[in-house]
Image (spheres, rainbow, N blue to C red):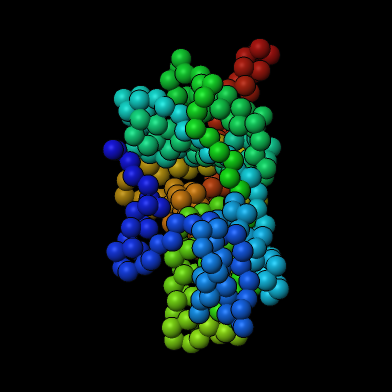
Amino acid sequence: MKWRSFDGYLLNLALGKGAHLVRARVDDIGWQDGWPRVKTQAGSPQVYDLLVVAVGVNSAALKLFERMGFGYTPPQTTKTYICEFYLGQEAVQTYLGSSMHIFLLHLPRLEFAALIPKGDYVTACLLGEEIDGPLVQSFLNARQVRQCLPADWSVPEDFCHCSPRINIRGAVQPFADRVVFIGDCGVTRLYKDGIGAAYRTAKAAAVTAIFEGISVEDFRRHYWPACRAISTDNTLGKMIFAVTRQIQKRRHDRLGVLRMVSSERQNEGGRRRMSMVLWDVFTGSAPYREVFLRTLHPAFFSRFVWEIIVGTVVRIWPFHRVRQEVRT
């Protein structure tokens, strides 16, 4: 087997540390004398000292917590699109190599998209606002995307795909007495690695529970600041993507980005300011705040404006010369 489940790998690590796994669907959650009570389809209700909720936003289980009466409201979400196409390892290496390919296309409702090589397959991931079939087809038919795929390739009739929803705004009141929400069902990073945010919020929740307590006030004072920091950073992320949308709409701005990245790659010893900004925005390797501050650096801003001007002049100059020759 070339690939194993990452979720399964993490679960096995937890089991190795002493966790007890109950493979059963939860069909009811409530209170019993102030303690959280969980009932599964396979057994009788069980009462717990602390209930840590780590479920995805695509789970119907979140509705169970709205009935518990402590003010929890699930996160705001939007629909994305993920699919896999079989190309064969040789074709994947030839056309995509080992790099993730990011696309900033001027397509309505599309924030950005990526093609990711994975062994014999290529994974397409589209993020934006309510991604639907026509938008997916527009992306796959775009010239820039077709250049990364074999010339004779076409979308097969049957392929693995899904349209999961992702968290774009954190939950309201993701904690209560003896209850705490971590990861996607609480607060997570905008368009970024769910596992990273889940780790940070889980760590904050664990530190609070062990060293402070498990009351609603304990979580508000010691757990909520970690969630609030992620939410604040997401606000800057929304600003960055708003600017990105404007760049997507303007051909000269897109050309400026391309020219700046290209010149940075040719200068091995120089600072790769634009390259690192793009890398950190689309991989989540750095907080949005750090990325935003880097874009305000005079060297970054002046170089970007210069590349836009040069790219515009280079693009217009041939047409200007043609007009002059026609006149003479």
Left or right, 7 with reference to 237: left
Location of residue 85 in the rendering, given as x and y in whole percent from the top left corner: 45, 29
Position in image of residue 177 (x %, y %)? 60, 81
Snapshot quadrant of residue 320: top right
* Left or right position of 143 against 273: right
Q: Indicate the position of residue 307 as horizontal and vertical percent values.
A: 53, 42
Q: Residue at x 48, y 43 (%)?
A: 260
Front-most of residues 120 and 111: 120
Q: Position of residue 92 (x, y in %)?
A: 36, 28
Image quadrant holding the C terminus, namely top right
The answer to which quarter of the image holds residue 110 is: top right
Nearest the viewer among 233 and 126 is: 126
Q: Is residue 110 left or right of residue 148?
A: right
Q: Nearer the viewer, residue 280 or 192?
A: 192
Q: How many marks?
A: 0
Between 34 and 154, the one lying in front of the other is: 34
User: Is residue 133 visible in this depiction of the protein?
Assistant: yes
Give the answer, above or below, for where 243 lies relative to 226: above
